[in-house]
Amino acid sequence: TLFPPLSFDPGVPATDTAGPGIHFRRMSDRPVSPSDAHFDDEAVIEADAELAEESPEAEAAADAETARLNERLLRVTAEYDNYRRRSVADRQEAVRQGRQTALVPMLEVFDDLTRSLDAARRAAQQDAGSTAFEALSEGVELVHQKFQDALSKVGVTHIEAVGEPFSEDLHEAMMQQPAPEGTASGTVLAEIQPGYRLGDRVLRHARVIVAE
């Protein structure tokens, strides 16, 4: 055989016997060098030195990547802010549209109630001694006032017309009449149907008669 069989001598404490004339020293028996205790620290220092010696091209590439990521973050943040503002505006517009849709038909009912009140007042005046007409007039007036208060609470206001200059944004001219003496042309002379607005939005234009 090329190598003799290995034999171990239990009586040799310091070394391992591998065969005649062959001995292996245990690693635990090797003297510890002071540099061994600082092996890991030296490796870290060397790695840091390698990082510090990176090429300017690598540093420039890292700076460019950082700038790109920052720009992307700012862009995404701005897009989210715009989306949030649009969402709030859309919700507010939906609320206004819903109110307008519900209120416009109610104005017709309010018109009928106003005409009923006028009729009740005329009847009470024609028959001043009748307590029934007076009670009817008072009852209709009470309902009319409550209706008007309810409209005011949700932001509905009456559009001023008589005596005001005609405005296409607020008024709808139904006819023209010669201007009375001292009245400027284009002045609203009479109101055929009252107009209303919700905030700054016109719910219904006032139908008017305009001076020529």
Image (cartoon, helix red, strand yellow):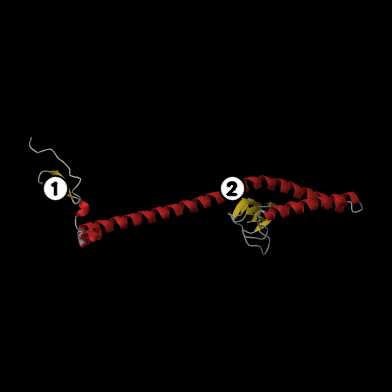
Residue name at image x 35 percent, y 57 percent: 70
| Mark 1 lies on residue | 23
Single out the residue that lies furthest toward the right: 129
Q: CA distance from mark 1 to mark 2?
A: 98 Å
- Point out the image quarter for the N terminus: top left
Residue 116 horizontal side relative to residue 99, left or right: right
Q: How many marks?
A: 2
Q: Position of residue 157 (x, y in %)?
A: 66, 56
- Circle nearer the N terminus (1, 2): 1
Kindly identify the amino acid type of the residue bearing the numbered disc 2: Gln
Q: Does residue 151 appear in this view?
A: yes
Q: Nearer the viewer, mark 1 or mark 2?
A: 1
Could you say which is closer to the camera, residue 89 or residue 113? Answer: 89
Kindly identify the amino acid type of the residue bearing the numbered disc 1: His
Q: Position of residue 128 (x, y in %)?
A: 90, 54
Q: Position of residue 55 (x, y in %)?
A: 19, 59
Residue name at image x 72 percent, y 46 percent: 109
Circle 1 crowding by C-alpha within 10 Å: few under 14, some 14–19, many from 20: some
Could you say which is closer to the camera, residue 21 or residue 40? Answer: 21
Q: Position of residue 111 (x, y in %)?
A: 72, 48
Q: Quadrant of residue 188?
A: bottom right
Residue name at image x 52 percent, y 52 percent: 88
- Point out the image quarter for the C terminus: bottom right
Residue name at image x 40 percent, y 52 percent: 76
| Mark 2 lies on residue | 97
